[in-house]
Amino acid sequence: MKKILKGAAALSFALACSLGAASAQEEGHSAAEPTHFPIHKPEQMDWTFAGPFGKYDKGQLQRGFKVYKEVCSACHSMNLVAFRTLSELGYSEAQVKAIAAEYTVQDGPNDAGDMFERPGIPSDYFPSPFPNEQAAAAANGGAAPPDMSLLAKARGVERGFPQFVFDVFTQYAEGGPDYIHALLTGYGQEPPAGMAIPEGTHYNPYFIAGKSLAMAPPISDDQVTYDDGTPQTVDQYSRDVSAFLMWAAEPHLAERKQTGFSVIAFLLIFGVLVYLTKKRVWRQVSH
């Protein structure tokens, strides 16, 4: 019986290998090409919102919003973010209304039962640049660009042991912004020898879903004009838009950290009071 099972297992393994080889040949991969591609882990950046006492830099958030608006919004939606929340970035009510009015949103139905378009208002959410997901995929090589509302919380590279142990104490939660910054600045590198990059895609060693991606380098130096004198480089653009996307994904981060610190302080004080009470109540009792 054991011989039969071993023979069946060997046959299954050989069949799987032959199918894998046939699949590789069909896809045009050479035998010399490595089956695993290297992924460089993102560098841990210095963010103002990092750590237990971190908070957002509103100036950086406004610059990041400008990068998103002038570059990223051409392909990426942000369906979960309302225009009115931009007031938290330091924009006045009039500025928020003006920003919302620059967008066209679909509304309705009207009295005739038809949908219609109108300028956006602060209570609206950032609209998608495409009418539906199918249209977005068709315009981008078959893959719809991801929505950016929660991108900074949904993306990130696992740090592994022992880093994740220290992350518990340092409150590291900036994996998403680190990854976005690394991806945006990771273009232009040459792939390793023997690695074939599909035509029409772009090698990026920080991309976690494959060895290359369809998105071309989205931004270049001096593409977005900053009014505050901040350097107009790809690195700075990447930092600013990464911080903005972190805010979009977690706008109440500073308040959450402040609440957590207050709770920890309360528990420490409460623990000391309980200990002193116990010592006072039981000090007259003989053991």
Image (cartoon, rainbow, N blue to C red):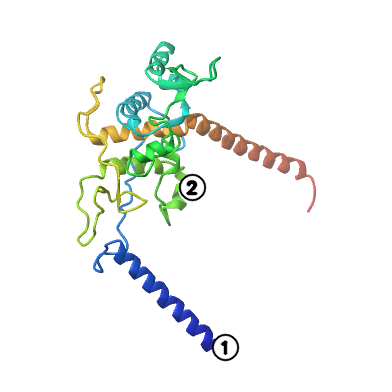
Query: Residue 252 got which mark?
Result: none
Percent across and percent down for residue 218 are: 27, 37
- Please indicate, yes or no, whether residue 145 appears anywhere in the rendered image: no
In this view, 75 is above or below 203: above
**Marks 2 and 1, how far apart in space?**
51 Å
Q: Nearer the viewer, residue 112 or 4?
A: 112
What secondary structure is found at the residue carrying circle 1?
A: loop
What's under tag 1, amino acid-wise? Met
Which residue sits at x=55%, y=35%? 260
Q: Which residue is mark 1?
A: 1
Q: Quadrant of the N terminus?
A: bottom right
Q: Quadrant of residue 178?
A: top left
What's under tag 2, amino acid-wise? Val
Q: Are marks 2 and 1 in contact (CB under 8 Å)?
A: no
In this view, 19 is above or below 61: below
Percent across and percent down for residue 281 are: 76, 41
Q: Which residue is mark 2?
A: 168
Which residue sits at x=50%, y=19%? 123
Label 2 crowding class (10 Å Cα cut-off): few <14, some 14-19, many 20+? few
Relative to residue 251, is residue 232 drawn left or right? left
Relative to residue 220, is residue 158 drawn left or right? right
Which residue sits at x=24%, y=59%? 195
Q: Nearer the viewer, residue 272 or 29?
A: 29
- Please indicate, yes or no, whether residue 268 appears anywhere in the rendered image: yes
